[in-house]
């Protein structure tokens, strides 16, 4: 008979792939923790907004962070490598971390996103975030002129 | 509400990790981002991250330049602000909280008893991070007299307040009035405590309290008191320094230590410098009490004390500015200045703004560009070392 700490959960991605994760590791996601505490008795926990690509990464991250033998320095090195992903994947992981309510992952990914954004021009930001500029030419000119010092 | 492909709470989470300068630039991306960045709730979220992130803390150094110009320099950002244009020379720093800074300008005259009478000429609130400002109305008490000014923040209504206390000929405080940002007007405050103020600006701001050193009687023999103005209750309170420090005239300094008022008193005669650090809990009127935290014997002279959110003093050794952590005695060089330093003041980067904030005009901007040029061509040396 396995003790509660060794209980394993099945997490099912939106594209129907199933992943086995120890409960003690998975509850770093508060959404999953709440489900477990509320006595969810489904065979597998469906994560409708997380595809298998992201779920695999998230599990990799969760397991690193749940590992009590890894030091802070090791975690930091892991983070540095973990965030080296195409920007769209960074945004994808942020959305997944938000949906799963996983604070540690949210922290690391948002920091990474912010660090990249600091270096971009306004045009690059629009491109990377797929944002349509809804200023008129005059409006944008006015905003830039008012805050000219921020562009230097 | 989705912005681009991300919900607003997620965008806010990412934005809260960006410095103010980047955020101001990002206002140009689209109107929704501009709204979010200008939103006061977002400003609070951003501030809470700034407070715990030392890279978002800066120091305004007030230098005395030729023509009596006072320049505020931010060593961290390598930036100069010459408030002479448009405000005239002689701007004096009052205090800072949540990234907002209050400055004043006064006109002094001597009277027959050789005591300065002061007329307030200007009161200004500005945010050095966003470069927005507002001049305050001067209040109803305009007769020249001694004036002490305090600044603070009332969290419940998110209101910023400036308190003015007046006294004549170095005597007991006579009147007080308080300005609130939300109403943009002054209100009379009752002075029903007897105390003589000994400073012209508040010594420390901690959350909703503005603290001032005072005495219980005029002249040199008075007992030192700590007067405070509670921004929420809008009352003046007075408490004497700890009993064990009452006997002699000690050298008192004040600081913000982990969000409480701390008194730093030099308790040893020259040449030894032994300091005691006491904190005061001031959660409700009449319930102040002192706790002795620790004793220290640093090898630096306390030249200027500064408001600090994390228990550090800014010291000046010759022309070098040093951050001194009172608890663990760490020192960190912040920068070097070439002109006499009138003061060095800690502030936190923030997006905080009040009703009626304006951009500085072209004149000021031109001058600030000149300051930056000076900084870049080596006339002033400000470097940040870790």
Image (tube, rainbow, N blue to C red):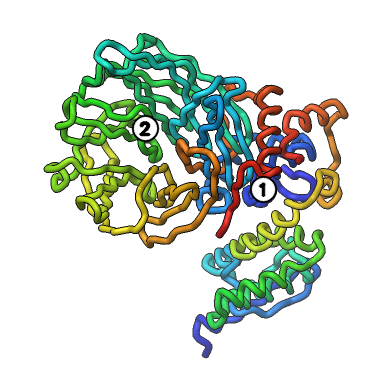
Q: Name the N-terminal-most of marks 1 and 2.
A: 1
Give the chain of mark 2.
B
The answer to which of B299 and B288 lies nearer the viewer is B299
Q: What kind of element bears circle 2?
A: loop
Q: Are marks 1 and 2 in contact (CB under 8 Å)?
A: no
Quadrant of the frame with the C terminus of chain B: bottom right
Q: Residue at x 82, y 64 (%)?
A: A86
Quadrant of the frame with the N terminus of chain B: top right
Q: Is residue B216 above or below residue B330?
A: above
Extreme residue toward the bottom, this view: A1
Q: Which residue is mark 2?
A: B202
Answer yes or no: are tags 1 and 2 on the same subunit: yes
Residue B294 makes an appearance in the image: yes
The answer to which of B7 and B55 lies nearer the viewer is B55
Q: Which residue is mark 1?
A: B15
| Quadrant in which residue B150 is drawn | top left
């Amino acid at each position: 008979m396995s003790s509660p700490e060794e209980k394993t959960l099945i997490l099912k991605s939106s594209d129907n792939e199933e992943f086995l994760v120890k409960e003690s590791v998975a509850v770093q996601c508060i959404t999953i923790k709440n489900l477990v505490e509320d006595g969810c008795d489904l065979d597998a926990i469906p994560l409708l907004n997380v595809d298998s690509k992201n779920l695999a990464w998230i599990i990799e991250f969760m397991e690193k962070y749940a590992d009590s033998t890894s030091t802070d320095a090791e975690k930091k090195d892991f983070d540095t490598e973990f965030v080296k992903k195409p920007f769209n994947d960074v945004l994808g992981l942020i959305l997944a971390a938000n949906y799963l309510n996983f604070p540690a992952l949210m922290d690391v990914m948002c920091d990474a996103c912010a660090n990249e954004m600091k270096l971009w021009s306004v045009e690059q930001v629009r491109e990377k975030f797929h944002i349509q500029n809804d200023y008129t030419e005059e409006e944008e000119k006015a905003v830039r002129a008012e805050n000219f010092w921020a562009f230097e | 509400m989705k912005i681009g492909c991300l919900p607003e709470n997620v965008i806010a989470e990412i934005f809260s990790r960006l410095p103010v300068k980047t955020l101001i630039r990002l206002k140009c991306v689209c109107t929704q981002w501009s709204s979010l960045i200008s939103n006061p709730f977002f400003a609070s979220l951003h501030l809470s991250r700034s407070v715990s992130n030392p890279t978002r803390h800066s120091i305004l150094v007030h230098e005395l330049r030729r023509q009596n110009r006072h320049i505020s320099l931010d060593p961290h950002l390598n930036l100069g602000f010459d408030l002479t244009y448009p405000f005239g020379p002689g701007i004096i720093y009052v205090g800072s909280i949540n990234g907002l800074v209050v400055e004043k300008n006064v006109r002094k005259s001597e009277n027959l008893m050789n005591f300065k009478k002061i007329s307030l000429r200007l009161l200004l609130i500005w945010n050095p991070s966003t470069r927005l400002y507002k001049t305050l109305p001067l209040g109803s008490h305009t007769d020249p007299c001694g004036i002490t000014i305090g600044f603070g923040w009332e969290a419940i209504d998110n209101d910023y307040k400036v308190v003015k206390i007046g006294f004549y000929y170095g005597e007991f405080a006579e009147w007080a009035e308080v300005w609130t940002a939300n109403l943009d007007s002054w209100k009379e405050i009752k002075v029903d405590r007897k105390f003589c103020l000994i400073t012209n600006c508040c010594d420390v701001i901690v959350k909703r309290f503005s603290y001032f050193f005072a005495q219980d009687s005029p002249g040199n023999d008075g007992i030192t008191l700590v007067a405070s103005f509670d921004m929420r209750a809008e009352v003046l309170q007075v408490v004497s320094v700890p009993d064990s420090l009452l006997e002699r005239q000690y050298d008192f300094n004040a600081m913000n230590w982990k969000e409480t008022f701390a008194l730093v008193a030099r308790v040893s005669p020259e040449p030894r410098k032994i300091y005691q650090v006491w904190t005061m809990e001031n959660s409700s009127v009449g319930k102040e009490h002192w706790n002795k935290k620790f004793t220290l014997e640093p090898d630096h002279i306390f030249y200027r004390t500064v408001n600090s959110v994390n228990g550090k003093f800014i010291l000046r050794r010759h022309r070098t500015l040093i951050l001194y952590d009172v608890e663990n005695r760490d020192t960190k060089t912040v920068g070097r200045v070439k002109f006499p330093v009138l003061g060095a003041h800690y502030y936190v980067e923030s997006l905080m703004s009040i009703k009626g904030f304006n951009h500085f005009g072209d004149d000021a901007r031109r001058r600030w560009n000149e300051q930056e040029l000076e900084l870049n061509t080596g006339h002033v040396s400000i470097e940040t070392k870790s």
